Image (cartoon, rainbow, N blue to C red):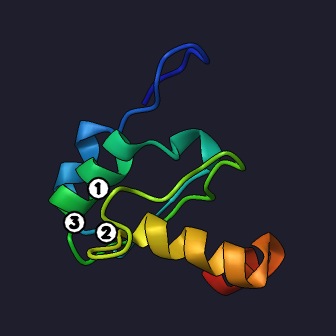
């Protein structure tokens, strides 16, 4: 994991040795590369990362929404506070 604020967050290689049911992080991890890496390594894992306030849905949100797209939709429909409570 990056220890310098200017470095982009990464998913540590150590996670390859454990089974993940969910990946929870703060908004700094709201990046396509992080979500893609977690989804690739752990397809069944829930990815719970609060989208940035400037986040936009992916290009495939209408036809093949990602977990992040569904989070954005939930926030748009019910508000961030409700999404956070439902997400744990």
Q: Between marks 1 and 3, how big is the CA–CA gap?
A: 6 Å
The alpha-carbon separation of the residues under discs 1 and 2 comes to: 9 Å
Q: Is there CB contact under 8 Å for labels 1 and 2?
A: yes
**Where's residue 24, x and y in %?**
52, 61
Label located before the other in sequence (1 or 2):
2
CB within 8 Å, label 3 to label 2: yes
> Closer to the camera, 24 or 32?
32
* Secondary structure type for disc 3: loop
Residue at the disc numbered 2: 20
Q: In the picture, which quadrant includes the C terminus? A: bottom right
Mark 2 surroundings within 10 Å by alpha-carbon count, few (fewer than 14), some (14 through 19), many (20 or more): some
Residue that mark 3 sits on: 42
Q: Is residue 32 above or below residue 49?
A: above
Residue 31: image quadrant is top left
Residue 72 percent coordinates (x, y) = 58, 68
Residue 61 x/y as whole percent: 38, 68
- Could you say which quadrant of the image residue 79 lies in? bottom right
Nearer to us: label 1 or label 2: 1
Task: State the quadrant of the N terminus.
Answer: top left
């Amino acid at each position: 994991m990056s220890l310098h604020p200017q470095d982009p967050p990464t998913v540590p290689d150590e996670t390859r040795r454990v089974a993940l049911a969910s990946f929870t992080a703060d908004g700094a991890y709201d990046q396509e590369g992080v979500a893609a890496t977690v989804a690739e390594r752990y397809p069944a894992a829930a990815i719970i990362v609060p989208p940035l306030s400037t986040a936009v849905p992916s290009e495939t949100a209408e036809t093949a929404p990602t977990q992040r797209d569904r989070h954005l939709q939930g926030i748009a429909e019910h508000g961030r506070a409700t999404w956070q409570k439902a997400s744990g």
